[in-house]
Image (cartoon, coloured by chain):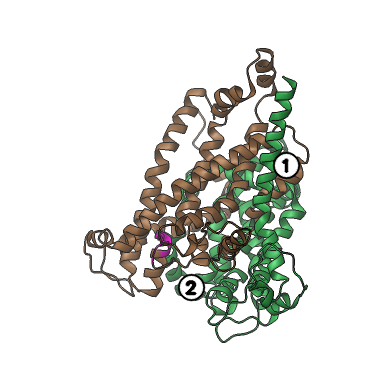
Chain colours: A brown, B green
Amino acid sequence: MTAPRSWWKVRPGQLSASVALLPLAMIVLVAYAGTVLWSLRVSLTDARTFPSDVYVGLAQYERLFHNERWLLSLNNLALYGLLFIGLCMVVGLLLAVFIDQKVRGEGLLRTVFLYPYAMSFVATGLVWQWLLNPELGLQNAVQTLGFDGVQIDWIVDQDKVMYTIVLATVWQASGFVMALLLAGLRSIDAQIWNAARIDGIPTWQVYVFIVLPMLGESIATVFVLLLTATVKLFDAVVSMTQGGPGNASEVPAKFIMDHLFGRANLALASAGSVVLLLSFLALVAPLFYARSRYQKRVGHP
Amino acid sequence: MNSRLSVARWGIYCFLLGAALFFLLPAYVMLVTSLKSMDEIRLGHLFALPAELTIEPWRSAWSSACTGLNCEGIRGGFWNSVGIVIPSTVVPILLGALNGYALSFWRPRGSQALFAVLMAGAFIPAQVMMYPLIQILAVLGIFGSLAGIVLVHTIFSMPVMTLLFRNYYLSIPTELFHAARIDGGGFLRIFFELVLPMSVPIVTVAAIMQITGVWNDYILGLVFAGREHLPMTVQLNNIINTTTGTRLYNVNMAATILTSLVPLAVYFASGRWFVRGITAGALKG
């Protein structure tokens, strides 16, 4: 038995390492944990322009869910998320699989598919705003070609405006999905392909029944990242439609920003941000749980 | 069998070419629009090449386009963004490298729990943190200043920067590190003399991610940068969406291209490194 030694005598560098991690600790405690708790607290008060100490229980949440604009924004986000995530996945996967067929000009094609991802959502929104301009944009170009009946005035149509935002952001982000899934495809053992060829299994069946399940983890990662982008949806809406026409393309992030700054309703905005956080957690928590169980079963680190 | 195979090849190439056209179309339209006069644009031939090439829209976008009463173009925003991007790349990378180094080689007590909370923090929507951060920066006296926006970018990039360096250092054999310890190297000496010189590849990846990410940011710049330091993305949106009177689509598209030039240049120059950043940064998901 050795006498208990103090830890700083054992590893003299440990103290320096702890000190070096102080900025990180401050960021985690104050900027992350602290701000979330602060927003949670404010959402339980009657704060308008300034923070307040008068607690009103869940009244702000009740008001929030009676607020038509908020309900519309949640609806829009659900529709958007479904289409954006779904389309990005399908387009990204198709591009990745087709590029993986030993095609010519692979490098050039990958560059073309991924460049929109280097552009900001603001620039993306502005380009597509111009392309979809009802007077001078795509609609006009298609109609002058002789297709008079074609209507592409979605951006000024309250029922269709969300689709235009889906279109623009899918254009921006699906190359990113392609890059991640292509990396996943390339990491699959070539032996599997050889074995499948010897057994005479058609290529598409190998993809559907063997490769796709093996991409499961990559797909889960892509899903979480796209979901994060969905919750953040703000820049593209602001630059493309400013939430219009009317309130037709309102989204939660914009609702919160408007109530924080324009409308000076701090408590309601905080309640909205807490709801946004909780809904996101409710969607990813089962996924993370399933993954950690899966990794335990197959003996991953 | 052979002809069916080549039909499949045809299908693959058709799909890929169609997709390439879809991805290139907006860039093409953006470029030709920016080189036309407004008179020509009003004719409505969206895809036509400019009948008369003009670079006037570019000049105007850079130095005389108006946001409200202010008609100085987008050049101010360009320099503001440069001023924000440089410190917002250097500081997070240095901090991220230091964090990754401490978390992988030294692992002081409680550090792994700290890292876990940080990773969870990566998923918090910015709106939840927005107002409290404003309050904190106001107390520190740096709200609406360059220092303020740099601090905010540092905060929001901390999860991915720390993760990037931690994972990179975990892949380095610990024998090197132990040898340095036995030779009497201290915490900072090992960091500067052994670890940082080995970090060039991951610093490159991190720099690409930060430069493009910070340059493309809109919401943080809008809220935290203050009127004197509004980044280019915010000014671009103001020029295009808050104009009264006739909309100058050619100037708008020139300004949009100008705003995208820096991240696009980084993308085209860095090639596979950009993709490496995507795959390395995605590990948190």
Circle 2 crowding by C-alpha within 10 Å: few under 14, some 14–19, many from 20: few
Residue, disc 1: B180
Q: Quadrant of residue B127?
A: bottom left
Residue, disc 2: B140
Image mark 1: chain: B
As drawn, A205 above or below B206: above
Image quarter where the C terminus of chain A lies is: top right
As drawn, A227 above or below A39: above
Position of residue A152 in the picture relative to residue B131 (left or right):
right
- In this orientation, which residue lies closer to the viewer: A237 or B79? A237
Secondary structure of the residue carrying tag 1 is helix
Q: Is residue B123 visible?
A: yes
Q: Which residues are magenta?
A: A247-254
Q: Quadrant of residue A162?
A: bottom left
- In this orientation, which residue lies closer to the viewer: A254 or B66? B66
Circle 1 crowding by C-alpha within 10 Å: few under 14, some 14–19, many from 20: some
Instruction: Examine the residues drawn in magenta and state their main secondary structure.
Output: loop
Q: Give the alpha-carbon distance from disc 2 to disc 1, as whole Å.
A: 40 Å
Secondary structure of the residue carrying tag 2 is helix
Instruction: Tell me, yes or no, whether dots 2 and 1 are on the same chain.
Output: yes
Q: Is residue A12 visible?
A: no
Task: Inspect the image, locate mark 2, and give the three-letter code of the amino acid beneath it.
Answer: Leu
Q: Is residue A124 magenta?
A: no
Task: Indicate which disc, 2 or 1, sits on the residue closer to the N terminus.
Answer: 2
Question: What's the residue at 74%, 28% (across, down)?
Answer: B6
Residue A111: horizontal and vertical position, in percent?
Answer: 72, 48
Residue A89: horizontal and vertical position, in percent?
Answer: 54, 41
Task: Inspect the image, locate mark 1, and give the three-letter code of the amino acid beneath it.
Answer: Ala
Question: What's the residue at 35%, 63% (across, down)?
Answer: A270
Residue A59: horizontal and vertical position, in percent?
Answer: 22, 62
- In this orientation, which residue lies closer to the viewer: A149 or A133? A149
